[in-house]
Image: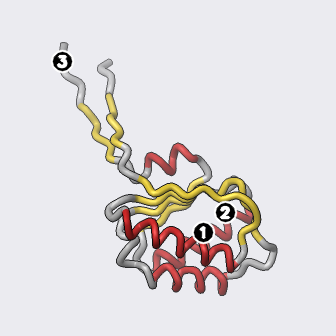
Amino acid sequence: MPAMVKIYKVKDFIRKTEAGNIDLDRSMEIIHELAAAATFHTGHNILVDMRETTIADDDSIGMMLQLAVEMARYKSLFKGKIATVVPHEEKRLAVAMQFKACLDLKGFQYEVFTSFEDAINWPSEIKEMSPTPL
């Protein structure tokens, strides 16, 4: 049986790693920091690693909408893919998926992951090489 080979070309990333408690004010700061970085690195994808963060119990869809509206103000800067890595916890995934739904409505290329490797692979170019007969 011939082997299939995949070649991954990892595109350039703006990488942001966060730790600590994330609330509305800190979330707004992160958006502004990413927008500033995106200004100087056009064409780059964004990877936000939030595995070492916690969120407040009162995070709501209203807050997610506020954050999505704030990101939409900078839409012209966020042209690439945005991958976010969150802890593999039911509540965190639920909040992340609410935020994703809001960003989807605004036309962003945004995905949520619990695996860092999957988050890196998503915006990478993948070329499958067909086997060559020996």
Q: Are marks 2 and 3 in contact (CB under 8 Å)?
A: no
Q: Which of 13 and 8 is in front in this view?
A: 13
Q: Are marks 1 and 2 in contact (CB under 8 Å)?
A: yes
Residue 99 location, quadrant: bottom right
Which residue appears at 73% of the width and 77% of the height?
59
Q: For the residue labelled by badge 2, is the local secondary structure a helix, a strand or a loop?
A: helix
Q: How far from the left and from the top, in percent, is residue 44?
A: 37, 59
Q: How far from the left and from the top, in percent, is residue 66?
A: 59, 86
Horizontal side, residue 120 vs residue 91: left or right: left
Residue 17, placed above or below residue 131: below
Spatial distance from mark 1 to mark 2, Cα to Cα? 6 Å
Select label 2 or label 3 by which is in front. Answer: 2
Spatial distance from mark 2 to mark 3, Cα to Cα? 45 Å
Which residue appears at 19% of the width and 12% of the height?
134
Report crowding for label 2: few under 14, some 14 to 19, many 20 or more residues within 10 A (C-alpha): some
Horizontal side, residue 19 vs residue 73: left or right: right
Q: Which of 53 and 123 is in front in this view?
A: 53
Q: Which of the numbered marks, if any, corresponds to residue 133?
A: 3
Earlier in the chain: of badge 1 and badge 3, it is 1
Which residue appears at 50% of the width and 68% of the height?
34
- What type is the residue that disc 1 sits on? Met
Q: Which of the numbered marks, if any, corresponds to residue 127?
A: none
Q: How far from the left and from the top, in percent, is residue 109?
A: 41, 67
Spatial distance from mark 1 to mark 3, Cα to Cα? 45 Å
Horizontal side, residue 64 vs residue 69: left or right: right
- For disc 1, the marked residue is 97
- For disc 2, the marked residue is 93
- What type is the residue that disc 3 sits on? Pro
Report crowding for label 1: few under 14, some 14 to 19, many 20 or more residues within 10 A (C-alpha): some
Q: Which residue is situated farthest in the left direction here?
A: 133
Residue 57, placed above or below residue 9: below
